[in-house]
Image: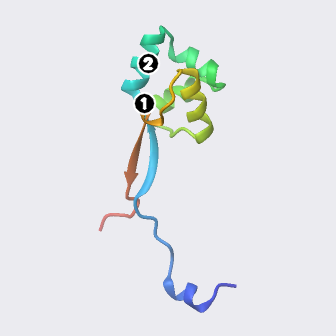
Amino acid sequence: MPSQTEESRGPRRRRGRTVVRLDTAALWKRLAVLNRSQNWLAREIGVSPGYVSMLVNAGRTPSGRIRKRMLKALGLNDFHQLFRLEVRDDEPQR
């Protein structure tokens, strides 16, 4: 049971949620350097081509496990070579 101080605070609000997005320009550039395709990448990281397509089109955000697999498959070491951080404010507009 929550204490009175927790109850009096009201609901928690999440501000400035950070989301990881795939940098598609960096991905296409790296695939071109390696002379590989999006389908090749999907096979290498163990996901469907449709899932990779959703990542490319910003329909999904990659999990930590997928990010690590992508970096390894593409021979990259630095997170920021392939991903960007996006800060989102999920509070409704008034």
| Label 2: which secondary element | helix
Residue at horizontal 39 percent and vertical 64 percent from the top: 91
Residue designated by label 2: 30
Residue 17: image location, x then y, percent:
44, 56
Q: Nearer the viewer, residue 68 or 38?
A: 68
Q: Residue furthest bottom?
A: 4
Q: Is residue 84 above or below residue 7?
A: above
Residue 12: image location, x then y, percent:
50, 73
Residue 70: image location, x then y, percent:
56, 27
Residue at horizontal 63 percent and vertical 37 percent from the top: 65
Q: Is residue 30 above or below residue 66?
A: above
Q: Nearer the viewer, residue 24 or 73?
A: 73
Q: Nearer the viewer, residue 47 or 35?
A: 35
Residue at horizontal 43 percent and vertical 23 percent from the top: 27
Residue designated by label 1: 81
Q: Residue furthest top?
A: 35
First in sequence: mark 1 vs mark 2 = 2
Query: Callout 1: few (<14), some (14-19), or many (20+) C-alpha neighbours within 10 Å?
Result: some
Q: Quadrant of the N terminus?
A: bottom right
Residue 82, by quadrant, is: top left
Query: Callout 2: few (<14), some (14-19), or many (20+) C-alpha neighbours within 10 Å?
Result: some
* Mark 1 touches mark 2? (CB < 8 Å): yes
Amino acid at the residue labelled 2:
Arg
